[in-house]
Amino acid sequence: MEEKGIKTLLEDVSQGKLPVEEALERLKTLPYEDIGLACIDHHRALRKGHSEVIYGEGKEVSDIIIIMEKMAAQGEKILVSRLDRSKAAKVRERFPESTFHPRAKILTLGHSNEKPAGRGTILVISAGTSDIPVAEEAAITARFMGNRVDTLFDVGVSGIHRLLAHNEDLRKASVIVVVAGMEGALPSVVGGLVECPVIAVPTSVGYGASFQGIAALLGMLNSCAAGVTVVNIDNGFGAGYAASIINRA
Amino acid sequence: MEEKGIKTLLEDVSQGKLPVEEALERLKTLPYEDIGLACIDHHRALRKGHSEVIYGEGKEVSDIIIIMEKMAAQGEKILVSRLDRSKAAKVRERFPESTFHPRAKILTLGHSNEKPAGRGTILVISAGTSDIPVAEEAAITARFMGNRVDTLFDVGVSGIHRLLAHNEDLRKASVIVVVAGMEGALPSVVGGLVECPVIAVPTSVGYGASFQGIAALLGMLNSCAAGVTVVNIDNGFGAGYAASIINRA
Amino acid sequence: MEEKGIKTLLEDVSQGKLPVEEALERLKTLPYEDIGLACIDHHRALRKGHSEVIYGEGKEVSDIIIIMEKMAAQGEKILVSRLDRSKAAKVRERFPESTFHPRAKILTLGHSNEKPAGRGTILVISAGTSDIPVAEEAAITARFMGNRVDTLFDVGVSGIHRLLAHNEDLRKASVIVVVAGMEGALPSVVGGLVECPVIAVPTSVGYGASFQGIAALLGMLNSCAAGVTVVNIDNGFGAGYAASIINRA
Amino acid sequence: MEEKGIKTLLEDVSQGKLPVEEALERLKTLPYEDIGLACIDHHRALRKGHSEVIYGEGKEVSDIIIIMEKMAAQGEKILVSRLDRSKAAKVRERFPESTFHPRAKILTLGHSNEKPAGRGTILVISAGTSDIPVAEEAAITARFMGNRVDTLFDVGVSGIHRLLAHNEDLRKASVIVVVAGMEGALPSVVGGLVECPVIAVPTSVGYGASFQGIAALLGMLNSCAAGVTVVNIDNGFGAGYAASIINRA
Amino acid sequence: MEEKGIKTLLEDVSQGKLPVEEALERLKTLPYEDIGLACIDHHRALRKGHSEVIYGEGKEVSDIIIIMEKMAAQGEKILVSRLDRSKAAKVRERFPESTFHPRAKILTLGHSNEKPAGRGTILVISAGTSDIPVAEEAAITARFMGNRVDTLFDVGVSGIHRLLAHNEDLRKASVIVVVAGMEGALPSVVGGLVECPVIAVPTSVGYGASFQGIAALLGMLNSCAAGVTVVNIDNGFGAGYAASIINRA
Amino acid sequence: MEEKGIKTLLEDVSQGKLPVEEALERLKTLPYEDIGLACIDHHRALRKGHSEVIYGEGKEVSDIIIIMEKMAAQGEKILVSRLDRSKAAKVRERFPESTFHPRAKILTLGHSNEKPAGRGTILVISAGTSDIPVAEEAAITARFMGNRVDTLFDVGVSGIHRLLAHNEDLRKASVIVVVAGMEGALPSVVGGLVECPVIAVPTSVGYGASFQGIAALLGMLNSCAAGVTVVNIDNGFGAGYAASIINRA
Amino acid sequence: MEEKGIKTLLEDVSQGKLPVEEALERLKTLPYEDIGLACIDHHRALRKGHSEVIYGEGKEVSDIIIIMEKMAAQGEKILVSRLDRSKAAKVRERFPESTFHPRAKILTLGHSNEKPAGRGTILVISAGTSDIPVAEEAAITARFMGNRVDTLFDVGVSGIHRLLAHNEDLRKASVIVVVAGMEGALPSVVGGLVECPVIAVPTSVGYGASFQGIAALLGMLNSCAAGVTVVNIDNGFGAGYAASIINRA
Amino acid sequence: MEEKGIKTLLEDVSQGKLPVEEALERLKTLPYEDIGLACIDHHRALRKGHSEVIYGEGKEVSDIIIIMEKMAAQGEKILVSRLDRSKAAKVRERFPESTFHPRAKILTLGHSNEKPAGRGTILVISAGTSDIPVAEEAAITARFMGNRVDTLFDVGVSGIHRLLAHNEDLRKASVIVVVAGMEGALPSVVGGLVECPVIAVPTSVGYGASFQGIAALLGMLNSCAAGVTVVNIDNGFGAGYAASIINRA
């Protein structure tokens, strides 16, 4: 479209409809404005197979609904993250066909029937039961982006046999998201067992010297296992997203 | 499955189809125990196409040489990281065919003539000139692991046009490693321009409130661009390694 | 007034109504007390064209109203910052002609019809939608102090083209206030594009390792772009005030 | 120049020398590459009246000399910051006409005989004697950028009368840079006395709970005096630079 | 050894001495898998004399009840920690024979009539009155695990005579748990008076620069008295558990 | 008394009533037990002229009343600190003659009619209006302990003339308590103006980078004025108490 | 003198030599300048009986000597703190009659033969042997300021009997300075034993989680013993100074 | 011995050799002074079977030798910790029969031929090769205190099979000391495998966000495995000491 706009301008110049000086003026502002804007958007649409994500926290329900309406009008699939139960109820009044995942606090609209597009399976692991909401946020995000996703919960390092019992699953995964709070040790153990990329997600689960996830975050950043990268505390969405683009690669 | 496999093996032994010694060998490699040890090593060799890495910092030169001799005896390629110039000189007396990269402080042995094995090109970007040693560490690691690697240095956010001028290179990469100190803002900008995975490496470059890389680390963890994952401060090796296994995936 | 007081004293001395010794005694205490107090207030009034600001947080509504009454009695324009909706309602019962800006949590009394006094236009930019309340606080403060103010919201670094599209506006500003949470990278990019002073305002927007604005604050303090100065987290008022006195300079 | 390039392209299209499609391709890459690059550089030169600054810390002397030669070839004035005495000696062998300021660790080349261009006088204040090197860095930077600069050292808050004695100087300044370590209280006092913009520079001077300048930095960020903005710890250059562009405004 | 064991097993299978099914069963428990799971659980049961503990915080009441039912079905004693009063009430509707300790927020089921099994007496000391809930958590945990437990509350260092008056009790203990908030100095004093192991528990009691227990935690980690080890802030359960396994040793 | 006990023991030994071995046993435990306990308590009563203080925060109203009854039975004056309004109401039902100071959250019982006992006047200063509750806590504590106390509120450093106007009061004080939040700069200025001891109290007043009083605390610890000592954040009671024992000295 | 200046001015007005308007102008600037300056300096000399202290760290030897010469010329006693051995040697070449205290790193000039002026004895206590340099800094400062000073070293809390054995000395002191590193618990114990003011000095002695004195600092700020105030880490001078002005009070 | 002194005193009283009053005087000071001092020392000697430990860091060699001579004169075994190689050489000139352990930086004097006295075997585990010095410090301390000690090095969590291969050794230990830097995850895994007490020692091994051992420390404090207690960063001595008194219990 934008490309078309520039082409039209050039054709106008070519046909003498537009003086060179005036075309120059218009071209000067174009690249930084519409072109860049539209171009990138276009690429995103073409390559990612999904549109923008709406971060629900701190947004008014009315604003969320307006944005969703604009996106839905263009036939886009929609994911709203960090949406609490009461806001979700109001959104679903307007979009009854949407699905709300209360544990992950994600609302999705436009389930694809298409088969998963990624190369392999993304495995989402949680260390404890309390880490499951963040793990679910990662899993649902990755599924929404068209991946096969398996989950494996409550396999923390204090009972290492629980993890080892699923060695087969670990080895078959193309990307693994490991979600852990407290000491955040699980990604190191998983990273030592597998060769695929491991994305570590620290959670704010814990008390006292866990400092709302800092202990887990530092543990993961200092992982002695190569191949482990880290996202922000409780950022299940970011991990699911990163796993998706790695799996698609 | 594993259980079935073991059962079949046992039945074969029971029926004399499988000699005890051979069964023992196969049990050795089955997942977990002593066995586990050998098995995993074997897998690692088979799948990664490269052996263990030697972390040089804090190790005696004599120890490094002993480990290198054992690895070299098995025909393995060797990478020693965080090796200072004086230690490297001593190692090179024993292994004159090895190569030392002084800026990245990496010593490698056994250059492969084989063509790169990864799917695409890994692009390593640095924000400033002072970040180059860490960026080189990432680039040399990724090349050592059999990838095509391009580099783009000194394209920090305070002169954003320098980055935008290489938009084409950014878009063609399969994985991008972004190395930055000070405010660590570059990964967010890059992450917003591309769709491939971005690995952010904070560096300890800066002074005052950079707190030896904490400012950059926090900036990267809080990146508003999805698809960005982070490694430890100055961990060029970790970023190069992670980029490699993503590129291989 | 105070000046008048001293003048009267001097005239009394001049006319022999007041003995030198007694005048000396009175002058000794004057400067540190009333004079100093009033003098400075007077200067402030003369030079700034506006009176004291009332910081509403933690103050009783009744106290706020008393202070406002005293100021209003002297015909001063009034700005109350950090005033929540319920307190504002009570203040407006007493001062129905006042205006409340709910997003910025600012109440103003005495809209000037006078045309803006500053040399140029102050541009207030926000990185995200959630940063708008702090940005509004800056913008309304600057307008209240008699400046032309433009705003540009939601132009964060993860979609850098949105900012670049407004390159013209950036270049025309005399001072720019940049408000950003999360990684706080926007001031560095803006600071690299313009030559005018840039005031960076970190916000507490974010989660996990944003640590209520510390990540953004550190990012801004470590900005690689020269000409960027920083105020406290969420301190929109301070940024608007500083921008005003720069624009007036 | 770049503008000329685009104009030529458009004329070629207009005259039928260049097909629309080919012109389109070339325009696509132009804005993000050469144009943006050159354009911004050009603007910087035109508007600032001075060229890039060289941050000397961590740079090889040979690299510094190469950069200086390129800049000198274009007749630019040069400022190298954070240059230690031994490096400076080597630089001066190559550029004997350069001046080295050992306390401020700044080397300058190309003293302007032109009279100061700024609107008023920049006043640089230090709280203690140990803060003088950072204060000098600010003062020399501001003078290099063409401003009248006055200094006032060792007027910290524990002897408040020393500051008050210079009340006249404070009031006459167009911008004030306040440099302080330890508790960093001086900017608040100064900010309460004057109406001009105050730029606060925390220094790493102190011991124990000063935490290398954190105490001073936090004190300045929390200043109860409006109109105070802050730069990084020990960032005299940044403060001098910001004061310059405010004074020029 | 393990290898020999497996070889013998295989030879037995080969010679028909051992049926396949039985060999499979034995192999299951040998290594680290499913087996590992059961094996470790078995050992835990045999050695500890108590089953798993349920961490109540953040768990749904319904989940807690389900887990309790499964454990109770196996005749296990049950301890639920960090259970608030309202949840406890619901649990007690289902398990009326359970006991709730409101101060310690612990619910126990299956009081043993068996006499204490540990070697000596565990002494739990608190520095202040506000530390008692955490101290009680430790004491009840240790009693639940079959130990004789004495308590000594409100004997903080600011009235050192209160502690010294109980010198006899201190000396007779086999393990001492010392619970303290604020400056957390008590473990150092106690550690200097006794020769038995001392487990220090920092609490979040305090305000201002206690930083929710960090001051006490750091104090304890830096104890100048040898023989003091530390657990997480407010982790009474962990201290009681560790004291139990030390007392049993 | 205790001395008498030992004397009796020795007399018994001397008269052959008590065998040496038994006397030895009793002497071993004496010093650390009863003696110390009673002795120290007695001294406290004799020397301080006031009894224990009750820290109300986190204590049950019923517990507070019990402790008060025991103290009141012995005719002691009572001070309960950090008592919220609702608890205070219940305490006053039982002790209608007690006085509650809602701003300082202190309840006192037993107003002394005796004239102040300290050597001079304690001056309590607050930087801002929001610091007054903490300042009142200090002032009421000092008055309760029998001192003449003056107060001076809202004289922060951003309007230094307000403080200087009270120079006379500052010089006449025997001890000064300075209460300040935000940048906590006031104690340095006061400490530079006077020669008497200055006790600095940081408050949690502020936002953003004040970090609940850390900025003020660090500022005060790094005060460049000699003679300033510091207490915990918001610890008005501790400052009032310390000022009292200094004034009494 | 200054007073004389104002008097002259008034007399001039009274005699008609000076117009009222002109007198007004001159009075406006007077109070903040010379008067305050001279007045305060004078008071300091009269009341403290000692002159300014020279902080030696970071000062050039030549600067120190110049300042000392000016002070010595006025017959003042001189104390230089934080002076290392090599600088001290150079100072002593110029001032051979000065005394250097190597452990405390203090140089003094002008020993007073006068008998101690304070009301009582200042007791300086150190917890460990490594804390002695800081304790000596406090003790020598207090002696220099004319106090009787006793010291008591290596009586830390892990061997509490060592402290209790000196109970008598503790009780007789008029002020106690307690110096401690590591967990910094000693001031709390001392504060509970005595009624006189206790000044706590944290030291940077320790390792690991002592964080260069932060653990000790936090411990002291959170002391449960009333009457304890705190100075900066390793600030022996500040503690000795504060103890002196309390003892003089 | 001390006990003998008191007994002699009592016998003298009993036999009329010592008047009661005089005995009283001597007893008054005894318990707090010599007796207390000696008494506790005596108990320590009787119960621990070893004397005081000398912390070598920061002590002069001459002081260390003096203390050693006094201890050696009483036939005590001696352990000096944190002694660097050059100091050790000087100590060994005076005590040639002493043994220096360079890796652990411990010097011991008086090797016992007696067989180990503890109940079981203490196992010291290190996660990495760089953690061995701290692990050796723990092992040598525990051996010096009369325990059987086994070691197991370089079995970190990134190659979990290395640890699991030694499952037998883990289970047989009576106490386990786990030494780990970086993410500090090993104690959690070990704690989940065994039932004996686990003492976790964080080390300062690592870089970047390991913050000199803070990451490991936090990881260990937040361990999800019950029965794990923690000592200060790099405190191998403390862990070895604590393990000894647990093993002796």
Image (cartoon, coloured by chain):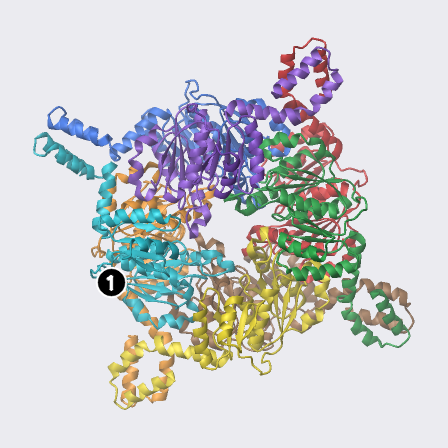
Chain colours: A orange, B cyan, C brown, D yellow, E blue, F red, G green, H purple
In the displayed structure image, the side of residue G54 where residue G10 appears, left or right: right
In the displayed structure image, the side of residue E144 where residue E44 appears, left or right: left
- Which of the pair G141/F49 is nearer the observer? G141
Q: Is residue D31 above or below residue H198?
A: below
Chain containing the residue with disc 1: B
Residue holding disc 1: B120
Query: For the view shown, which residue lies furthest in the top direction?
Result: F16
Q: Is residue C141 visible?
A: no
Q: Is residue A223 above or below residue H32?
A: below
- Which of the pair A15/D129 is nearer the observer? D129
The image position of residue G199, as x and y in percent, is 67, 43
Disc 1 marks a residue whose amino acid type is Gly
The image position of residue A169, as x and y in percent, is 24, 44
Quadrant in the picture for the C terminus of chain D: bottom right
Res. D3 image quadrant: bottom left
In the displayed structure image, the side of residue G124 where residue B177 appears, left or right: left
Taking the spot 61% from the left edge, 31% from the top edge, the residue there is: G160
Q: Is residue H25 above or below residue B18?
A: above
Dot 1 falls on a residue whose secondary structure is: loop
- Which of the pair A99/B3 is nearer the observer? B3
Q: Is residue F160 visible?
A: yes
Res. C64 image quadrant: bottom right
Quadrant in the picture for the N terminus of chain D: bottom left
The image position of residue A39, as x and y in percent, is 31, 71
Specify few, some or many for label 1: CA neighbours under 10 Å numbering under 14, 14-19, or 20 or more: some
Q: Is residue C215 above or below residue G9?
A: above
In the displayed structure image, the side of residue A180 where residue B25 appears, left or right: left
